[in-house]
Every structure is written in C-alpha cells, then in structure tokens.
Amino acid sequence: MKKKDFTRRDFIKTTGAITAGAVLAPSAACSSSPYDAKGLPTALLGKTGVRIPRLIMGLGSRFMAVDEEKGLEILETALSRGLYYWDTAASYKNAEQTSEERLGKILKSVRNRVFLSTKVSERNADDAKRTIENSLKQLQTDYIDLYQIHSVTNEEEVRQFGATDGVLPVLRKYQEEGVIKYIGFTGHKSAKAMKLAAEMYDFDTMLIALNHQEKGKQPFEEQPVPFAAKKGMGVLGMKVIRPRETVTSLSADDLVKYALSLKNITAAVIGHDSVEVLNKNIATLQSFKPLSDERMQELRVELDPFYRNKNLPWMQPGYYDGMYWA
C-alpha cells in the first residue's frame, strides 16, 4: 500500500470516523453537535442554530487547481484543525473531476463531522432535481446540510424561484424529506436581486461577494447584507482575497481580518491551494480581533482602486463560480 493510503487511513482513525460508506441521518446529526472547531472562533449561522467556524473552506477553482492528493491533504488538515464547514458546488471542477467527486472520496468516512454546503445553478425544476441527485451521488452522502441556489444575477429570475416549475419548490421537497437541512442562495452581480431574494423567500443563508464596485453602484454591504442579517439569515462573504490581484500591497492577513470585521458578516468563504496557505489563514483566525474603525477606514482607502476596477472577472457576462480563483 502506498504511503498516502496509510496517511488517509490514519486520518480517518484519528477523527473517529464512522464506517466507510455509512452516513449519519440528518435527524441523528441534529441530536447533538458533532462538530469540533478546535478552539477556533465560531458564530451562529443565522436562525439555523448551527455554530460554524468563521472561516469556511471554499472548494472551487483554487482548490481544484491542485491535484487530488494535495486537495485531500488540504481537507484532512482543515478538519483536523477545526475547519469543518466545506462549501462546494455542482459546477466546480477541473479537467479530471468535479469538486463534489473529490470531496466524496473523503466525505463518506467523516460525514458526521462536516457541515456540507453545495449549490445548484439550474433554475428549472427538472434540471435542478437531476443536479441534486447527481450531487448526492458524487458526494457519496444521503443528505446535504445547506443547499444554495447558485449565482443570482437579476430580479426577474428571483421572482421565478418559487414558480411551480422553479428551483425552490424542488429544494423544499427535498427539505421535507430530510435530504436537505437548510436552503440559501449566492450571488455577486446585483445588490437589488440579492436583497429581493432575501425579501421574497424564507432562506436560511446568503453567500454574497464583498462590496467590489464603486460605492453606490452595487452596494452589497449597504443593502442586502443588513437586510438579510435583520431577517435572521446567516450572511457569508466571498471574494475576500481577490483584491490582492488589483492592489498588491494588501496582505491576505489584512483582507481576512477586514472581511471578518464587517458588520453582519457571519463568516468568510476562502479558497486554499496549499496546506501552507491554509495554516496561515488559520493562524489569522486564531488571533483575530475585530479591527478598529480607524483601521477599517484605512483599508477602505487602500481597497478603493479595487472597488473601481471595471474588469473584475465575476462581473463579466458568462461568468460562473469556478472559472477563476475564488
């Protein structure tokens, strides 16, 4: 047996994993919290009552840029150090496999210790059902903790979520059956559409890009974020590290602290392509204290060129999460 197989087997033993192939039913998972943040800062995920680490493992393009062995090592390290919230999507993939397939290779053995979220891009009921069934198969699980409608782009599509042939009734049906625990939505293009989604439906979470355009153009932090928080939703931030591509003087450490210091942000989703980067972000989280108003203002000034950038990839037509670094 190869050395990496021993490593994986040892990891499963040390985490007290359940027998490979068996999973804990949703009702049993809810009876008492099986999650262990290893002392890392946590927060309640809105009205769900679930306590999550304030740093979420984003398993999109940055994670999928590394080979499978390295990716599984990142997941093993994350779980062993307290990062048990793993966020993926049906559309995340590389040339060899999907993110869900990769997760399934380790998830089936540690399922009850992981809070798992994934996403569906399809808006039609039949297409959404096929995607959900495929996600369950690839992830090798019989339930999803949080299922999210992926990448809200405009107000019209939001109004169609609840239609008879829309995506939301499908998610609700799976929720009634215990296959899905919580339902949320994500987006990074329209503040108005994100706010409307929070207004129209009883979602549990919102995953939203931090304010990345000139203030007043797409005021994510000023409009949908406080509204969703007031409604009792968990509000998760993404695109946290991306400003470094435009403003190289900004440090990842400062950007993580900035995101976690924003009012109403429950946690931040961050992608990792190495154990070294993961450990640095964990160290930042371990020592985290909210930044002062003065420091937040200083960082806003430094971030201004990024906010004004007209070429942000996820604001371009045809973009979907997973195409670029998350």
Image (cartoon, rainbow, N blue to C red):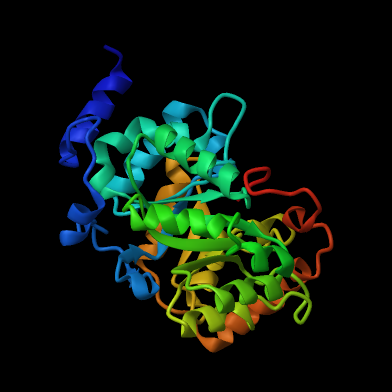
Q: Residue at x 59, y 58 (%)?
A: 241
Quarter holding the N terminus?
Answer: top left
Point 80% across, 70% down: residue:
308
Decide if residue 146 is in sight here. Answer: no
User: Going by the image, does 113 lie left or right of 130?
Assistant: left
Q: Quick check: can you spot residue 215?
A: yes
Which quarter of the picture shows residue 142?
top left
> Residue farthest to the bottom?
293
Q: Is residue 163 left or right of residue 73?
A: right
Residue 237, position as x, y percentages in the image:
54, 66
Residue at 18% of width from left, 53% of height from top? 28
Q: Residue furthest front?
A: 164
Q: Position of residue 209 (x, y in %)?
A: 62, 65
Vertically, is 107 above or below 187? above
User: Residue, x 36% and y 75% (percent of image)?
Assistant: 47
Q: Is residue 222 above or below residue 102?
A: below
